[in-house]
Image (cartoon, rainbow, N blue to C red):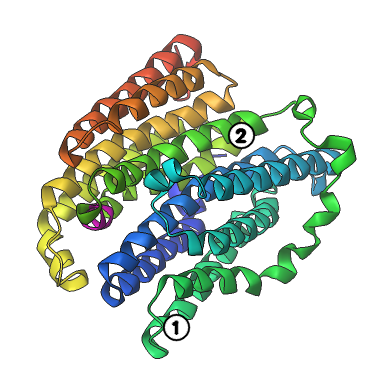
Amino acid sequence: MKINFVKSNLYLLFFTSLNFILSYIFIYIITISTSDEVYFQFTGIITFLNLISLPLNSLGQSLSGLFKNGKVNKKKIQIIFTISLNITILFIFLFFLFSKMSFMKNIILIDEIYIKYLCLVAFLNFLFAFRISFFQGMLDFKNWSFINFLLILFRTLVLVILFLLLKKNNVIHILLAFIISYLLFSPLYVNVFKYYKFKKYFFNFVKLNFNFLRNLSLICLYGIVLNIDVFVARYIDSSESNIYYISALFGKIPFMVSSILTYYLYPTNVQKVEHNLLKILILNLSIIILSIFFYKFFYNIINNLLFPNLTLDFNLILYVTIIFGIFSISNTISFKLNASKKNIHLIIKYFALIIFIFLVFSLSDIAIMLKYMLLFSISYLVCDIVVLIKYEKNILGRTV
């Protein structure tokens, strides 16, 4: 029985689109209401949250094999939750520790007084993400997307109250908007601690005999890729990094959309329901092309309507769109390789990432950084295509 790909996922696509709109409204309110220094702190905070929140998306994909006919494999969920919580706490502790070190302060560039609030947001983010990942595990994308939408809606409404009504336009109140929105959902996730079995599992990765670590590695990788340019821009030129962040947001839309599309790709391939890589790649490529044409014809309207006091660089937006468009295609193929249990592409990419980081943090110009980013993105796509062709006997649903 054939399923119309777009029609069958229209509900999820609709709420995903609303999430993007609300997220941009959230950023827009902060952009028009804060000073350059507050906005600089905000870009660092949101970049850190992206780094820790994107890997949490792997939880749902890992849980997809644990729900059979509505019944859950309780033991494996206990393993995942115990190890995930330990990793999250360790990561938050290390971040807190590094933020106290002088050499790391020059890289993180987030004021020390905000670190404790940021750590709390990261912890609440983990609890929320783990709980709603149950819906992904059951392939219940309707509830998953709707609850995500409610979270972002409440966060935006809290920010409207704090910033526009109460005129509390500072970094603490941005963080409060995150904290309050997560706490509103605390009844949903407060009972997840029953899955924590410290003595039994702690860091027992050996018991994870499924795709958890592979997914975690992949999403950590692209979480770094999606945010490394903002970290480098803040490090290279703090005065220009605010403009870069806003411009880069538009260019990264194809990548963020492709990350949502992989939620459909992964479970269907693992359970051998449908070959849908070609459909997703066509949709992915269409989004990239439409984004380029949209920015080409509506750039001035976007700039004057959303950011009248700023002059965004159209060439920068176009350049970032192309770079992260390439990354988005690579990301989609990577999930196909993960579903097929291929690891070599991850090893190659992490090695390339290490080289890239060493190179770009020695640069003194954002424009040069973008040229390195373009070469970096092409190298990832080439790696994925080569591995896909070499190891996949059935590519894009066709026998080779």
Q: Position of residue 393 (x, y in %)?
A: 51, 12
* Picture quarter with the C terminus: top left
Mark 1, secondary structure of its residue: helix
| Residue 315 in picture, x, y percent from top left | 12, 46
User: Residue type at mark 2?
Assistant: Val
The residue that disc 2 covers is 273
- For label 2, count other residues whose C-alpha is less than 10 Å away and answer few (under 14), some (14-19) or many (20+): few
Residue at figure coordinates x 15%, y 58% from the top left: 312
Residue 143 visible to an observer of this rendering: yes
Give the structural element (helix, strand or loop) at label 2: loop
Left or right: 396 in relation to 244: right
In the rendered image, which residue does mark 1 sit on? 162
Q: Amino acid at mark 1?
A: Leu
Image: 263 above or below 390: below
**Furthest-right residue in this view:** 199
Measured as percent of width and height from the top left, residue 175 is found at 50, 68
Name the N-terminal-most of marks 2 and 1.
Answer: 1
Q: Main secondary structure of the magenta part?
A: helix
Is residue 281 shown in magenta? no
Instruction: Give the residue displayed 38% in from the left and 86% down from the top.
Output: 167
Callout 2 touching callout 1 (CB < 8 Å) = no
Q: Nearer the viewer, residue 258 or 56?
A: 56
Q: Residue at x 64, y 74 (%)?
A: 184
Q: What is the CA distance from the residue labelled 2 to the residue labelled 1?
A: 47 Å
Name above or below for residue 400 compared with residue 254: above
Label 1 Cα crowd, 10 Å radius (few <14 / some 14-19 / many 20+): some
Q: Which mark is residue 351?
A: none
Q: Residue furthest front?
A: 102
* Direction from residue 13 to residue 206 in the image, left or right: right
Q: Which residues are magenta?
A: 241-247
